[in-house]
Amino acid sequence: MKKHNYSAGPCILPQEVFEKSAQSILDFNNSGLSILEISHRSKDFVAVMEEARALVLELLGLEGKGYQALFLSGGASLEFLMVPYNLMKVDGKAAYLDTGTWANSAIKEAKHFGETVVVASSKPENYNHIPKEYSIPTDASYFHCTSNNTIFGTQMKSFPTTNVPLVCDMSSDIFSRVLDFSKFDLIYAGAQKNMGPAGTTLVVIKEEILGKTGRTIPNMLDYQQHIAKESMYNTPPVFPIYASLLTLQWLKNLGGIAAIEKINEAKANLLYTEIDRNPLFKGTAAKEDRSNMNATFLLENEAHQEKFDAMWKAAGISGLAGHRSVGGYRASMYNALPIESVQVLVDVMQELEKNI
Ligand code: PMP
């Protein structure tokens, strides 16, 4: 039986993506060849790459606005250093908002390249909220933030207006909500939440911000090289990109980001309403900053843990254990998680209340 998969990533993808990508391994486009054995330069794969890059821009509303979409490898973690390499001016500085473990990792990498100003941090409160009062140095090469903090269950509901390029790690909420994506100059996201399997990273760049640092950048880490080679500077991760294309097509057929946003809001509402109502549970993140993707919560009384764990496992739920830095539970409700799965979890929480 298919589990209710709350994994934080890699995570649930649409069932039709599993089926179609499985079929492509056996026989891709009725070619008599598996997608795993064809050249990335073959006509069939070049078409996949072109469609995926175009569909990203279409879904984000960035077509014809000077942006390029790339499918790279190395995870979002490689972007932590590619961003400063490509954007931080020699002898310049960059500004960062520290909202969690991943933001912190990005800050650490930026420090290798120059002055890294942390404009605000919620670390002293174990990252349970998004800092709101801060100012961004006007002479920074860019400002970097993390739209959704996968581990701590917080999400930026608004973004600062600034004169410096805006860079955002959207790994865990890209394609989940309507934003004015044209406010951002560079967006990156590991595929393995809302876009596809692990193995590729989406980078969306406003081309005009590149080539201004005065640095010599090794080819493999140079966004301009990847753009010039149409995201095929080296052999791209063919299969993760194909599965990502299938997920993007699924999203488009559903009505795009505006349609999935409504579903994501309904799922988050259902679960947070129960967390707040049920006296056995409490949320860990500040209410105004709660993530619609990753809901983090605790049992008020840890003595109920064994019983609760046994109950949700028996209900076919998987991947609900919290990250060690927060403890308790984390329900990751990415795009492909159906609302029915959230109802199953809410039912279990109500069952627990009745049985205590
Ligand atoms: N940023 C965020 C917000 C993440 O959630 C993660 C991983 N879960 C990363 C960066 C790191 O991504 P990767 O493992 O692809 O390097």
Image (spheres, helix red, strand yellow):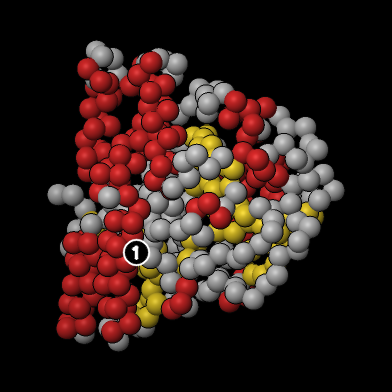
For residue 340, above or below residue 207 = below
Foreground: 104 or 170? 170
Is residue 259 visible to the viewer in this orientation of the structure?
yes
For residue 251, above or below residue 339 = above
Q: Position of residue 63 (x, y in %)?
A: 46, 41
Task: Residue at the far right: name it.
Answer: 91
Q: Residue at x 60, y 49 (%)?
A: 185
Q: Is residue 275 left or right of residue 66?
A: left
Q: Residue at x 33, y 60 (%)?
A: 261
For residue 287, above or below residue 321 = below
Which quadrant would residue 136 be assigned to in this image? bottom right
Q: Is residue 144 left or right of residue 128?
A: right
Foreground: 347 or 98? 98
Q: Residue at x 68, y 49 (%)?
A: 109
Q: Position of residue 222 (x, y in %)?
A: 66, 33
Q: Is residue 192 left or right of residue 253?
A: right
Q: Residue at x 60, y 25 (%)?
A: 228
For residue 106, above or below residue 65 = below
Residue at which label 1 appears:
331
Q: Mark 1 packing: few (<14 Cα in 10 Å), some, or many (20+)?
A: many
Q: Position of residue 61 (x, y in %)?
A: 44, 47
